[in-house]
Image (cartoon, helix red, strand yellow):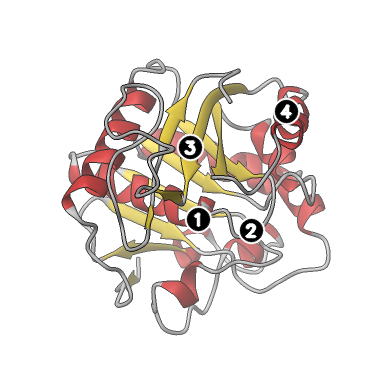
């Protein structure tokens, strides 16, 4: 299995790192049957890829075996964001039968964490995600990893995430603070629910921590620190929370 280095990965500050530990704990307390998790959002650029990546790192840091699958075959940002260099094969190659799983599943420089990048953009991502190959991939990962985190496109834009959710034990919606309406989030939640997936909750992301709107350290609601100008992770709420 080939190995990649995340040369563009930045260390999180203490409070943001603690926030991801809190998110990790919330996921673990969601039940022992929650192993494969779908991450989505309402619109692009809400931060779901960063949240799923950093949560995968947090699981690996805790001693878990974790694989992150980049299932955004429409507009993936992971390989470029973390400066991994040229990725020769990815999920699209595997699902279309061009590459084997060993060729697309890569070790990383983070102990205990593997990753499958999306590969090239394809004209039929929804069809590929509905294929037997994707089902077989998820089943393989269930057997070989403690957690499988799947980054999917925004469900408010395309249907891919709901298709992936059929193979998952739970789903998390990443929401950018003050960027989308409550009704929009409810629509996305209802679309996910049609897949019969357990909705674990929401992550409130890009929270401006200095304006007093989101109080620090209020358990189960908002807060948790500062990463640059915005908190990289703001809240983890259960199904139905705003």
Closer to the eye: label 1 or 3: 3
Secondary structure beneath label 4: helix
Examine the rendered structure and indicate whether residue 73 appears above or below residue 87.
Answer: above
The N terminus is located in which quarter?
bottom left
Closer to the eye: label 1 or 4: 4
Closer to the eye: label 4 or 2: 4
Q: Real-space Cα distance between discs 4 and 2?
A: 22 Å
- Report which residue position mark 4 lands on: 186
CB under 8 Å between discs 2 and 1: yes
- Report which residue position mark 2 lands on: 72
Mark 1 Cα shell of 10 Å, populated few (<14), some (14-19), many (≥20): many
Q: Nearer the viewer, residue 188 or 76?
A: 188
- Report which residue position mark 1 lands on: 49
Examine the rendered structure and indicate whether residue 103 appears above or below residue 209.
Answer: below
Residue that appears at 30% across and 69% down: 9
Q: Nearer the viewer, residue 176 or 11?
A: 176
Q: Real-space Cα distance between discs 1 and 4?
A: 21 Å
Examine the rendered structure and indicate whether residue 151 appears above or below residue 186.
Answer: below
Secondary structure beneath label 2: loop
CB under 8 Å between discs 4 and 3: no
Q: Please report whichever mark, 4 or 2, sits nearer to the chain's N-terminal start.
A: 2
Residue that appears at 48% across and 37% down: 203
Residue that appears at 22% across and 63% down: 11
Mark 2 Cα shell of 10 Å, populated few (<14), some (14-19), many (≥20): many
- Report which residue position mark 3 lands on: 203
**Residue 130 placement (x, y as % from top left):** 76, 43
């Amino acid at each position: 299995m080939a190995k990649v280095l995340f040369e563009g990965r930045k260390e999180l500050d203490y409070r943001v790192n603690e926030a991801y530990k809190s998110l990790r704990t919330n996921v673990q307390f969601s039940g022992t049957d929650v192993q494969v998790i779908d991450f989505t959002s309402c619109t692009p650029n809400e931060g779901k890829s960063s949240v799923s990546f950093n949560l995968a790192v947090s699981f690996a840091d805790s001693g878990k075996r974790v694989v992150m699958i980049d299932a955004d075959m429409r507009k993936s940002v992971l390989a470029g964001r973390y400066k991994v260099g040229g990725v020769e094969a990815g999920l699209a190659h595997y699902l279309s039968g061009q590459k084997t799983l060993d060729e697309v599943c890569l070790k990383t420089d983070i102990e205990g964490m593997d990753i499958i990048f999306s590969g090239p953009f394809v004209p039929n991502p929804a069809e590929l995600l509905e294929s037997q190959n994707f089902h077989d991939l998820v089943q393989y990962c269930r057997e070989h990893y403690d957690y499988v985190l799947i980054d999917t496109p925004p469900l408010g834009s395309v249907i891919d995430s709901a298709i992936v959710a059929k193979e998952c034990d739970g789903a998390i919606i990443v929401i950018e603070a003050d960027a989308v309406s409550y009704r929009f989030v409810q629509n996305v939640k209802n679309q996910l629910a049609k897949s019969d997936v357990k909705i674990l909750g929401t992550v409130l992301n890009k929270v401006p921590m200095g304006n007093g709107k989101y109080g620090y350290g209020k358990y189960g609601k908002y807060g948790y620190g500062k990463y640059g100008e915005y908190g990289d992770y703001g809240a983890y709420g259960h199904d139905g929370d705003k």
